[in-house]
Image (cartoon, coloured by chain):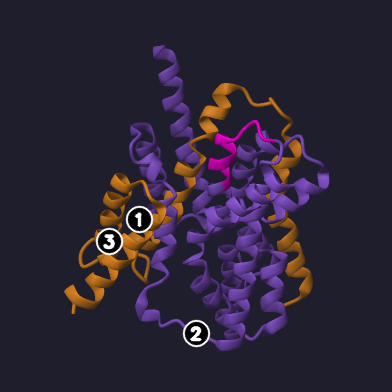
Chain colours: A orange, B purple
């Protein structure tokens, strides 16, 4: 690998982060645009969450014998009621460990 | 000065719980870099120059598979394209800053830093030093990422794979959405994003499934917003 490839990749990545912060001036976005942009986390994070939970190693959907789905549902329930980020992460992780080390053994 | 330090510390504290999965992820990345034989300097160099975990792993995978530079760079761009949307969301709060601030804050803007600092900036719109929150959250991510990369390079795979810690990446992003679970429109947008990504994971080229899913989900959000405005 050449360092030049790494530097180009770094420039591209920086450009994705810097472009809008640099280009958009204050109050250029109207209320409608701001309202739609408020959905950005809801529009991006599930695309990061879903594939590793639902797809197996070869990339096909695995709905049976999939402890990640159950653990994720449990984390959502805990998150819904506690509204606490740390509680949600640990609820998911501990229930996942219970499923793979105790239940599925 | 005092209030700047306080806001900086708040940023560090807010992002800290989200760093739990970043450590094993960084170690895994360091191990992959060494396994592929690019050496310690390039493995760490990627973490410093690119500073984007998923895109670094994609770059290494494609490189080891013999992909051309054009394909590698397109894929890095596609994986990181979501940052354009983060920048658009945050620009409202950062537009009055000096160029040097914009450059530094852009460099450290990760998913996790965006998530916690966006919440903070929305709630503390009037404060002149509010951007210190993003500085704190961003540099916490940066520091943890570099340290865990070095751990992976130096120690190899010290975290047993059986623990399934990669699942905590999904869990942290899920935890960041807890305030959205109560809003019907947000649930629809989340389902569109997640389903398109699951279907598109293997079919959309250049690992562009995240930005494709995000844009379709945002179109749904736009549609729902416009329907809402019509009713009023």
Categorize mark 1 by other alpha carbons within 10 Å: few (<14), some (14-19), many (20+): many
| SS at mark 2 in the image | loop
Q: Residue at x 66, y 41 (%)?
A: B130
Q: Are marks 1 and 3 on the same chain?
A: yes
Look at the numbered disc 1 and give the secondary structure of its residue.
helix
* Magenta stretch prevailing secondary structure: helix
Mark 3 sits on what residue?
A: A71
For the residues bearing labels 2 and 3, Cβ distance under 8 angstroms: no
The spot of residue B25 in percent (x, y) is: 51, 71
Which mark is on residue B157? 2
Q: Which residues are magenta?
A: B117-127
Q: Is residue B222 above or below residue B155?
A: above
Q: Are dots 2 and 1 on a single chain?
A: no
Residue drawn 71% across and 29% down?
A26
The residue to which callout 1 is attached is A88
Q: Is residue B221 left or right of residue A87?
A: right
Using the numbered discs, state the Cα–Cα distance from disc 2 to disc 1 in whole angstroms.
Answer: 27 Å
The image's mark for residue B41 is: none
Farthest residue in the front direction?
A: B2
Q: Are marks 1 and 3 in contact (CB under 8 Å)?
A: no
Where does the image place residue B209, in percent across and percent down from the top left? 49, 53
Q: Is residue B14 left or right of residue A72?
A: right
Separation of residues labelled 1 and 3 (CA atoms): 10 Å
Distance (Cα) linking label 2 and label 3 = 25 Å
Residue B181 lies in the magenta-colored region: no
User: Could you say which quadrant of the image residue B163 lies in?
Assistant: bottom left
The answer to whether residue B84 is seen in the rendering is yes
């Amino acid at each position: 690998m050449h360092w030049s490839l790494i530097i180009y990749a770094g420039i591209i990545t920086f450009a994705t982060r810097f472009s809008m912060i640099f280009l958009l001036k204050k109050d250029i976005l109207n209320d409608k645009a701001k309202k739609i942009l408020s959905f950005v986390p809801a529009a991006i994070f599930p695309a990061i969450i879903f594939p590793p939970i639902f797809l197996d190693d070869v990339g096909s959907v695995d709905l049976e014998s999939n402890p990640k789905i159950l653990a994720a549902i449990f984390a959502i329930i805990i998150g819904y009621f506690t509204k606490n980020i740390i509680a949600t992460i640990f609820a998911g992780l501990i229930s996942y460990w219970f499923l793979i080390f105790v239940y599925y053994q | 000065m005092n209030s700047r330090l306080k806001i900086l510390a708040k940023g560090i504290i807010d992002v800290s719980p989200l760093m739990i999965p970043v450590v094993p992820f960084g170690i895994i990345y360091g191990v992959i870099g060494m396994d592929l034989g690019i050496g310690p300097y390039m493995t760490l160099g990627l973490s410093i120059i690119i500073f984007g975990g998923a895109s670094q792993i994609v770059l290494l995978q494609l490189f080891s598979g013999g992909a051309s530079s054009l394909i590698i760079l397109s894929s890095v761009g596609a994986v990181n394209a979501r940052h354009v949307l983060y920048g658009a969301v945050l620009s409202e709060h950062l537009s009055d800053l000096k160029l040097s601030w914009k450059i530094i804050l852009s460099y450290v803007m990760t998913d996790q830093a965006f998530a916690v600092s966006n919440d903070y900036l929305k709630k503390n719109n009037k404060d002149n030093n509010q951007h210190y929150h993003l500085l704190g959250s961003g540099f916490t991510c940066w520091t943890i990422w570099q340290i865990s990369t070095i751990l992976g390079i130096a120690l190899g795979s010290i975290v047993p794979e059986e623990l399934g810690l990669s699942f905590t990446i999904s869990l942290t992003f899920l935890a960041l959405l807890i305030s959205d679970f109560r809003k019907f429109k947000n649930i629809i947008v989340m389902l569109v994003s997640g389903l398109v990504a699951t279907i598109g994971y293997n079919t959309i080229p250049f690992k562009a499934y995240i930005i494709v899913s995000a844009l379709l989900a945002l179109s749904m959000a736009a549609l729902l917003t416009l329907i809402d405005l019509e009713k009023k």
